[in-house]
Image: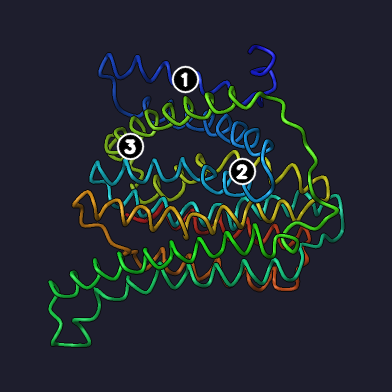
Amino acid sequence: MIEYIKKLPKISILSLLVFILILFKFLSISGVSVFIVSALAILGIVVIIGKATEEISLYYNPVVAGVINATFGNITELIISVIALIKNEVEVALASIIGSMLANLLLLLGLSMIAGGTKYSEQKIGYQATQSNITLLAIILLYLTIPSIIPLSPIFDKSITPDLANKILLNISFYFSVIILITYIFALIFQLKTHKSIFIPEGEKLTEKPEWPLGFSIIVLLISTVAVAFSSHMFVDSIEETHKILGWSKFFIGGIIAAVVGNAAEGAVAIWVARDNKISLSFQVAISSCNQVGLLVAPLLIIIGKFLGLDVALNFNLFEIVAMFSAFIIAFAALVDGKTNWFEGVVFVITYVMISILYFLHP
């Protein structure tokens, strides 16, 4: 067992902070210290989840492996969002959805383009793969933003009262989420079965062999999932006091801090493979994670909220909508030709920094 653990990335040692969190829970300690320790613990556990998921997927054919990665790739974001929802931190839950997508699309992909572009003057992603993913991103953008317009309807239509608008918003959010989940299933079939060859070119396929036994990988994944759920619970519980003490808005905590922490593992993988001139694989890691949040995490959050009897809807503020449209426009303009370079990566990262400042200054 020790030899398997030694193969984990060094940053995974942060997962041991979960024992400090257990002590904090036992001693009823709260506040900023819990916020920092839980965020670092989540960062370490996410790396282990990524490793365990990768190991399990190597035992199966590419289609099954793709489904496994798709299912567990964003488990942390889903857990944080659901716990925030149950704790009535709706702003944090919704902010983490948009924030995670922005972190993947702009920061993660941008850093990957810089990492690869400083070594190679130009890298090719693949025109068809780019077009398919940009199309999916456009559908997600409509899914997330159209319901947010409904609360404004009483201003333009006097026959619609604010209460009626809210009821329509809740229903639309639920029905749209069911449709998007169905879209996600079709997207998996398209990407992993019927047209998988256009997403990862033959020259970039990895031929890795598992380093862990299958049983050990499954046990690690299950334990890590429980650990990240507990750490996420402590993280969400500490948000209120952190908000009061540091003055950080819950919008910033959910949209930036939680998003960056939850996507650290995928970011490391994307940047690493981009340096090896496997930018198509790097692109798939980043854009697929982004799309999975919109196609899987967001609708599941709404549907789970519905069955828990919670009034949660896709009602994002103007800042989030502008940020998403800005990210989409930049991604479309830069990636539509299927090629990348380091300067485009810089533009992506700068855009993310600007949006982060917007989130930070938001009250």
Q: Mark 2 belongs to which amino acid?
A: Glu
Assign a secondary structure to mark 1.
helix
Residue for badge 3: 236
Where is residue 345 drawn, in percent x and y?
A: 70, 58
Q: Amino acid at mark 1?
A: Leu
What residue is at 43 percent from the left and 65 percent from the top?
A: 180
Q: Earlier in the sequence, mark 1 or mark 2?
A: 1
Residue 17 is marked as 1
**Front tag of 1 and 2:** 2
Q: Residues within 10 Å of mark 1 (few under 14, many from 20)?
A: some
Q: Which mark is residue 61?
A: none
Quadrant of image for the C terminus: bottom left
> Is residue 359 positioned above or below 180 on the image?
above
Q: Which mark is residue 266?
A: 2
> Which amino acid is tagged 3?
Val
Instruction: Indicate which disc, 3 or 2, sits on the residue closer to the N terminus.
Output: 3
Q: Quadrant of residue 225?
A: top left
Confirm or deny contact between disc 1 and disc 3 (CB under 8 A). Answer: no
